[in-house]
Image: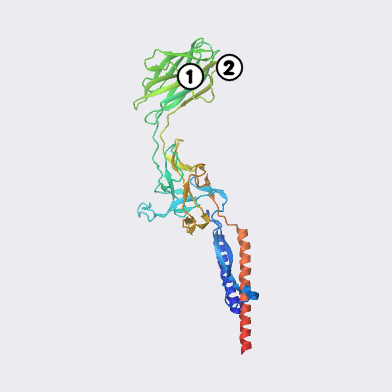
Amino acid sequence: MTFFGALGTAVQGINAQAAAIGHISDNVANASTNGYKQVNTIFSDLVTNKVIGDSAGIDSNRHMGVSANAQFGNRRQGAIVRDSSSTTSIAITGNGYFPVSKPTGFDPVTREPNGFEDTVYYTRLGDFRLDNSNRLVNSAGYYLQAVTTTAGQTVAAGTAPEDFVIDTTDIDPVATSNVFSQINLPATALVGKQVTTGIGVVDANSNEQNFQVIWTKTAADTWDITINTTQATPSSFGPVTATFLNGTLNTLTSSDLNVAVTAAGDATLTMSVDYGPGAQNIVLDIGDFGGGFSSNATSSTTQFAGETREASNIGLTQNGLLGGEFQYISFREDGQITYNYANGRSQTGGQVMLGNFREPDKLDRLDGTTFIANSDSGLVRYGAPADPDSTTGAGTLVAGALEASTVDIAEQMTRLMVAQQAYSMNGQVISAADAMLSRAVDMKR
């Protein structure tokens, strides 16, 4: 190798180590950037073509320096850190990226996005928050794409997400149509014993109203049922007479024209009540004829003796739901987006679909810890998090958490010291080669 070859090789070494230091500085600067993926440096030696006149003894002349290339660790998992400041932060464990979009501009008055680019971006930065356009945007200014769904809807693997707008309207009330009673009446109770149970039911105007079921023992194995609907028309129903055989419900009869009694199969009482908004039918289900108590059943009526003369196994439920104002959204591990309301109700409103690639390390990097697909990375494949039917191998979500940077500061310090020493040695090689070249020139003079 000539003096000039040595100089060229050393210069290449300096450039390569400078690139490595650049990668290290980028990593150190983003050590606290959520969703950031560490960049490493891969060094490769350069080999020139053998020229005419080279001998076998100096074949090593073909080695002429080094090149430095970035190695992107997009597959590397960052630590999951809880984010107690937000209910809309989500992190990915495993494969996949959040598909996000970039706005083309904002309305000068409302500051809402007035359009989005056609390009789909991908990120692991999940510090989303609800903005004034009812969309989820992260700290880098990218908006989450998802699939709008309804309760019970299943999103097929491969479904591409779109611009996702959260419906923040109030949830409508559901008027009560069924009340389910579960009770064991004391078989040893004296005639005249009264057992009262009650529950709030919902009328058509989302008001909670009183609904009482009163059991009065009138004879051996015989009880009368009275239903009180305070401040309604009618204000009471019954009595309905129930008889028992061997501790289970045997017959159910009524002379009240306002109550329809089911005489076979399920023991139900149907009544029409008006709490103000208008008549609504309520069915009181008290179980099955001849049916015993079951902890899994929503309704049952039995008459067995207990340690006391008091009723037991009492339970009263209803299917009405109060209306409520939208409060916040939450995420599930399977990617379902849940709307939560002030009355404690919730419903599914969307589905997060993660994008995965054949070669995620080949994705092109952009500002804001985002990526875009290219021919080397392969086409995106969408799948719901942890969906066993998906071929994407997407990971799961962790709600209320963020994925931290994958940068290891101690590792970067070690790499920096090695790069510094190598840079310095290449500089000394240049100085030595220059001095030898100058000596050779002086000898000719």
Residue behind mark 2: 306
Front residue of this view, candidates 195 and 247: 247
Residue behind mark 1: 288
In the rendered image of this protein, does residue 352 appear above or below residue 259?
Answer: below
Q: Are marks 1 and 2 in contact (CB under 8 Å)?
A: no
Considering every residue shown, the one lying at the far bottom of the view is 445
Amino acid on which disc 2 is placed: Gly
Looking at the image, residue 248 sits to the left or right of residue 257; the answer is right
Q: Which residue is found at the position 39% from the left and 17% from the top?
A: 259
Q: Quadrant of the C terminus?
A: bottom right
Q: Secondary structure at mark 1?
A: strand
Label whose residue precedes the other's in the sequence (1 or 2)? 1
Residue 213, percent across and down? 46, 20
Considering every residue shown, the one lying at the far left of the view is 278
Amino acid on which disc 1 is placed: Asp
User: Is residue 95 among the parts visible in the rendering?
Assistant: yes
Give the quarter of the image for residue 276.
top left
Front residue of this view, candidates 126 and 218: 126
Residue 230, percent across and down? 40, 22
Quick one: label 2, few (<14), some, or many (20+) residues within 10 Å? some
Give the numbered dot on residue 84.
Answer: none
